[in-house]
Amino acid sequence: MTPDELLRELGELAMSLGPAVRPAETDELLRSLTQTARRLFGAAACSLALLTEDDSELVYTTAAGEGADDVTGMRIPSTQGIAGWVVQSGQPIAISDLANDPRFAREVAEQTGYVPQTILAVPVETAQRMLGVLSLLDRDAARPGAEQDMALLSLFADQAALALASVDRFSILGKVLLDALAEAATGSDLVLALRQAADGLPAADADLAALAAAFAALARRGAAERRLALALVRDIGDYVERRPPRAR
Amino acid sequence: MPIDKAWAWGGGSGSGITVAVVDSGIDAAHPAVRAVDRAVALQWDAETEQVASTEGPHDDLFGHGTACAGIIRRAAPDVTLWSIRVLGSRLTGKGIVFAAGLRWAITQGARVVNLSLSTGREDYFGLFHEIADEAAFAGVVLVCATNNVSAPTYPAQFSSVISVAAHDGQDPFCLDANPAPPVDFGAPGIDITVPWLSGGTIVSTGNSFAAPHVTGLVARMLSKHPHLRPYEVKTILRAVASNGVAGRTSDDD
């Protein structure tokens, strides 16, 4: 195997392994973050919506409080409503009489059955990318003006962005690894080889990544679960081997 | 003669001054807006990979542009209003579309541009720096809402623009000067009633509502003193701020 091939294999291996070794706590962290924000601000609900890969939609991934079950998984176009405004403009906003925005009230009521009076929404972003929006519904009316809570909620949004950025890095672990080696390496040939290997890596395969992540989650359950999963996968492998080939 | 509010904008109505609102569009029929003199909508065309523009009347897709226009109209009733819609179509190419809208305002001859949006993306630093310079050299005043987060956003971060955050007050003629920029001024933006969709109003909070207050005052000032350059405008705003040095002479010290 030539050094170039070795580097490429190393990168591809890391790329496939990345999702398996990503911190399992991220989802829990985000859930805890929305729960903490909801309690701290005395709000009826707190939710996190993330932009899809192509930025066309916002998907509510995490929610706590009123209507949380209905909100989780909800998708809205990123070009609409208060949340859409926040990701488009990059500006936080608070509205204290939502009933006066008839379009908003109708849309939300249709999807969740809960119509808030007030909303406070801040962008979740890194220096590279807009990631989504963190929203508080009906925060405690006894709290002082929205401006201070807006700044505080932005700190929560920064934490969410940090957690999400680290998950992102695991999904492109091979590239991150080779880039980091290139940063550390001296000697232009090696640096060049590493950079080329990194650039030549295939994009992360979402299905494989999900599979790897599922295995990692199982593995953390214990040895018996690990053996069960392994046996199942081997059975599936045998079955696929014996099955007549599919027409293409 | 002291530089005070009466000198700065007393009797000014914004007449003869073109103010461009780069936002989500403006509802020209809203009673608080009354009229929009020119409207252009820009969006990213994925096929040609270029910004496409359509001139002609359009709607406000969120309500926000109408809110800004209403605030400006209240402060400077006779301004010529332009709506440059850069938000609401799609997110792809957003920064480029935003930059193109800003450039359109500058090259078409707007005198003041209200930007209640900004980008935190580092790759746009250079582009917006260049445009902020173009505006400054052309004598166009850029008024930008700052973000509440600690990270810099562009073009609000640049020294040639007037950057505004919300302060706790309702008087549209009252400004605070920030002794520690990059945020230059505080203006009303907390729990204020603003025009919104369908001819209505809402009570809202955000730095993006503070910026148009300053935009309106700048338009008034320019209608009274048409030859002011952007840096002079900023200096005068500083002088008339509630914590500024209005009316003071060296004897006061």
Image (cartoon, rainbow, N blue to C red):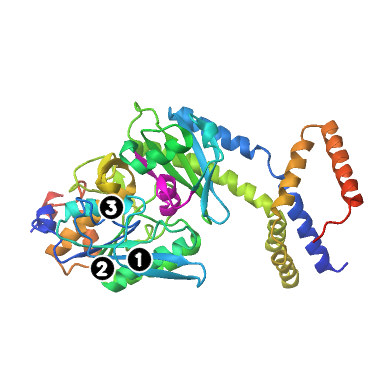
Q: What residue did someone put label 2 on?
A: B110
The span shown in magenta is A77-95
Q: What residue did someone put label 1 on?
A: B102
In magenta stretch: residue A182: no
Residue drawn 57% across the image and 37% down it: A30
Tag 1: amino acid: Leu
Q: What residue did someone put label 3 on?
A: B66
Q: Is residue A9 above or below residue B139?
A: above
Q: Nearer the viewer, residue A206 or B190?
A: A206
Query: CA separation, marks 2 and 1?
Result: 10 Å
Which percent across, then down, holds residue B220? 16, 59
Tell me the subunit letter for badge 2. B
Label 3 with label 1: CB-CB less than 8 Å: no
Tag 3: amino acid: Thr
The answer to whether residue B68 is left or right of residue A28 is left
Query: CA separation, marks 3 and 1?
Result: 18 Å
Which percent across, then down, holds residue B233? 22, 61
Label 2 with label 3: CB-CB less than 8 Å: no
Tag 2: amino acid: Ala
Q: Is residue A123 above or below residue A228?
A: below
Tell me the crowding category of disc 1: few under 14, some 14 to 19, or many 20 or more residues within 10 angstroms, Cα based.
many
* Disc assigned to residue B80: none
Q: Is residue A194 visible?
A: yes
Q: Residue A247 sits in which quadrant? A: bottom right
SS assignment at label 2: loop
* Quarter of the image where the N terminus of chain A is located: bottom right
Decide which of tag 2 and tag 3 comes sooner along the chain: 3
Query: CA separation, marks 2 and 3?
Result: 18 Å
Decide which of tag 3 and tag 1 comes sooner along the chain: 3
Q: Is residue B196 visible?
A: no
Which percent across, then down, holds residue A107? 42, 41
* Quarter of the image where the C terminus of chain A is located: bottom right
